[in-house]
Amino acid sequence: MYALEINNLEKTYENKLHALKGVDLKVQEGDFFALLGPNGAGKSTLIGIVSSLVNKTGGKVKIFGHDTETDLNQGKTCLGVVPQEVNFSFWESCMEIVLNQAGYYGISRKVAYDRAEKYFTKLGMWDKRNDRSRTLSGGLKRRLMIARSLMHEPNLLILDEPTAGVDVELRRSMWDFLLEINRNGTTIVLTTHYLEEAENLCRNIAIIDKGNIIEDTSMKSLLGKLNTCIYLLELCNSCEILPEIDEFQLRRIDSMTLEVEVLREQNLNQLFEYLDKCNIQVGNIRSKSNRLEELFIRLLNNKDEIHNGQ
Amino acid sequence: MGNERILIAFITIIIKEVSRFLRIWGQTILPPAVSMTLYFIIFGSLIGPRIGRMDGFEYMEFIAPGLIMMSVINNSYSNVVASFFGAKFQRHIEEMLIAPIPNSVILTGYVIGGVARGLVVGLVVTIVAMFFTKLQIHNYFIVVSVVFLTAVLFSLGGFINAVYAKTFDDISIIPTFVLTPLIYLGGIFYSIELLPDFWEGISKLNPILYMVNAFRYGILGVSDIEIGYAFTIIFVFIILLAGFALTLLKRGTGLKS
């Protein structure tokens, strides 16, 4: 069964903005799925429709087989949402917020309290439980929204940029937490601008741009489409003149750094041999950018180029 | 969602709403007590003796039911309009909208919150009134039912106002330009029998007149209108407003894009 099944989803806003143009998307149960796209691509509209906060213009949405037109409330019980922007009452304490959310799903106070303790502890904010939400830092607010979304233990969790504005350490701990709940059976759909995050966490990926899904595949297969890798070579000694090597495209960044584009079928050892012959010693080598980031930019700029394997 | 779960959701909304206005009692309960005390001092003690008796009662005694009703109307309305608009403004209304709560439960929860504040403030104002005049209840059933139904009616009104409101100005326009004039012209301070026939007829188009008079009848036993007619008007308005509010929730007006 699909955790989320979207067919021909259309959304046109009152201002005539055609935000979604017949989107089809399927997310398998148990998946950790990335939904990527530039700002204004339609990600939040899509999430808004799935979570019934935005009215769709056309198409169908099913959450674990429950059609949101005919069986909305059953669909809602399967769904948890962590929105992009903070949307809790600033006047309530963290505990009040999560207990109320559980109450909206018909969960008794006792059960809700136990769950609140579990999730607050896991997210490292148990000692903040009685603090007013407005006093929390940005990272804690994000964690509070994650805890709140899990109070009814949904089968499908949608996270709309959950780590935006969160420091690196906290982001890593949130990744561990999300991987754990995914391992325990919760299907996760993640939107993020940190492509490293999507690459590390997600098994499948869809890229949306201007209201269309332009790529929907497994992460492995998508990354496999990237035919080249760009490396930065940090040199041991200064290089004033760029050596001419036919097989590799070299570019001089500065006297101590070279950039090289390596095709998938090319061998790095070969490059080092050529450089050695030119008396250039490489002290360190690193990838110029995240692979998914490279692909993402190329896809948005020219998706045909990728499809043709160029 | 089963009935038990719906009940939990309903109770959760009520607890949230009641604790909201109790938490800020300095803004919700105290001000009406202060302003009603001033009404009693100025209109009852200072001006009242010069006006004399009205419908056979001391002026202070005559205006007390209307002032209590005015507090109930204002507070039940403003509780729901402020709370629901605040939830929209801070976007935490989304917590409810994504949950499997029937619209009728959301509406009833907010209305009960408004009714609770209306009744609490009504009780406080009644206690204040007892310092100035004696209140002998003529008909308990009518007093309780009219005050409850009126609070329900104006809570529904507040809810609809909040659904349409886009700014904080929008939640004060109706109370300032519609509700307050209707309340003041609703026979709180005078009997409409004192008015010329034309204005008496116009006054009878004001629904608040029926609520004030029905409540006054429950306390003093006198009224300018038929009590049965008053109940009919209140019920009709409740049904119309509840139906309209549910339609707005179903459509997502003011809530969903």
Image: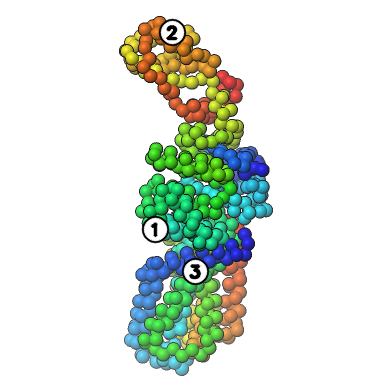
Residue B205: quarter of image:
bottom right
Looking at the image, the residue that sits furthest to the left is A238
Q: Identify the amino acid type marked 2.
A: Tyr
Determine the residue positioned at 52% across, 84% down: B143
Residue A73: quarter of image:
bottom right
Q: Are marks 2 and 1 in contact (CB under 8 Å)?
A: no
Q: Quadrant of the N terminus of chain A?
A: top right
Looking at the picture, does residue B10 appear above or below residue B73? above
Label 2, secondary structure: give it. Answer: helix
Q: Identify the amino acid type marked 3.
A: Gly
Instruction: Give me the C-alpha separation between circle 3 and circle 2.
Output: 79 Å
In percent of width and height, residue A28 lies at: 62, 40
Q: Disc 1 marks which residue? A: A130
Q: Disc 3 marks which residue? A: B113
Looking at the picture, does residue A8 appear above or below residue A238? below
Of all chains, the one bearing label 1 is A
**Labels 1 and 3 in the same subunit:** no
**Labels 3 and 2 in the same subunit:** no
Looking at the picture, does residue B200 appear above or below residue A255? below
Determine the residue positioned at 32% across, 12% down: A237
Looking at the picture, does residue B183 appear above or below residue A206? below
Of all chains, the one bearing label 3 is B
Which residue occupies the foreground of this view, A6 or A39?
Answer: A6
Q: How many marks?
A: 3
**Labels 2 and 1 in the same subunit:** yes
In percent of width and height, residue A185 lies at: 58, 44
Q: Which circle marks residue A274 in the picture?
A: 2
Q: Quadrant of the C terminus of chain A?
A: top right
